[in-house]
Amino acid sequence: MNLRRTLLAATAGLSLAGLLAVSSAHAQTTDVGGVKYDNTARVAGETLQLNGAGIRYKAVFKVYTAGLYLKDKASTPEAALAAPGPKRIHIVMLREIDGNELGKLFTKGIQDNSTRDEFAKSIPGTIRMGEIFSTRKKLAAGENFSVEFVPNTGTTVLLNGKPMGDPIKEPEFFTGLMRIWLGKSPADSNLKDLLLGHKPQARTTEN
């Protein structure tokens, strides 16, 4: 009888431990359309926080998820753009897209949200990023890429976790890239709100 009680107690303890482990693991990630985003990320030896994450829609279609990582939380575009230290944007594709077309869309997004002078300073990096994506015939659903900025080092593009060449030195490039989602003409206004940690507005099908 005592042995049975001991076994039951041990089993209950293991079950509780399992539940706590699952709960702890869940608390360390944020689910975005079925994609798990870690709530923290390490870049250049520093711990960044997931500032916000959401889904990019084109009309009614889900295109990709995006997450913004900063050292400290920022709730406005100005604060996010001016945030000190490393920064990271992580994107996971939800549908297949032509790599060359994606590069063109990012170039247009930077241009639409920058002054002529700002865009001119980001041109070298914009060309490099376009070249990186043009080497891929397509990006399939589930593939991902990150863009990481480190002060005094530059911007590194990682495709499925693999760095694609040397860092892009011009800091204006990463700022221009962030404006694609946080600028005055964002790719998706609801995604902009989510990246800044806000509740999204009612979605329309105009984009």
Image: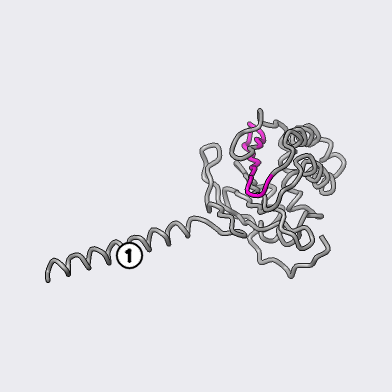
Residue 4 lies, with reference to residue 139, above or below; the image says below
Query: Magenta stretch containing residue 147, yes or no?
Result: yes
Position of 153 compared to 28: left or right? right
Position of 33 compared to 176: left or right? left
Where does the image place residue 80, in percent across and percent down from the top left?
A: 67, 51
Pick whichever, 24 or 179, lies toward us: 24
Q: Within the image, what quadrant is residue 143 found in?
A: top right
Position of 13 compared to 75: left or right? left
* Screen quadrant of the N terminus: bottom left
Which residues lie in the magenta part? 140-157
Residue 45 lies, with reference to residue 82, above or below; the image says above
Q: How many marks?
A: 1
Q: In percent of the image, x 80 and y 47: which residue is there?
A: 109
- Element at label 1: helix
Q: Within the image, what quadrant is residue 114 found in?
A: top right
- Please tell me whether the stretch drawn in magenta is mainly helix, strand or loop: strand
Where does the image place residue 136, in percent across and percent down from the top left?
A: 72, 36
Q: Give the residue furthest to the left.
A: 2
Q: In percent of the image, x 55 and y 51: which residue is there?
A: 49
Where does the image place residue 57, in percent across and percent down from the top left?
A: 74, 58
Pick whichever, 185 or 13, lies toward us: 13
Q: Give the residue furthest to the top.
A: 166
Position of 2 compared to 20: left or right? left
Query: Magenta stretch containing residue 4, yes or no?
Result: no
Q: In percent of the image, x 55 and y 58: which residue is there?
A: 30
Where does the image place residue 113, in percent across and percent down from the top left?
A: 82, 49
Q: Which residue is mark 1?
A: 16
Badge 1 local density, few (<14 within 10 Å), some, or many (20+)? few
What's the amino acid at mark 1? Leu
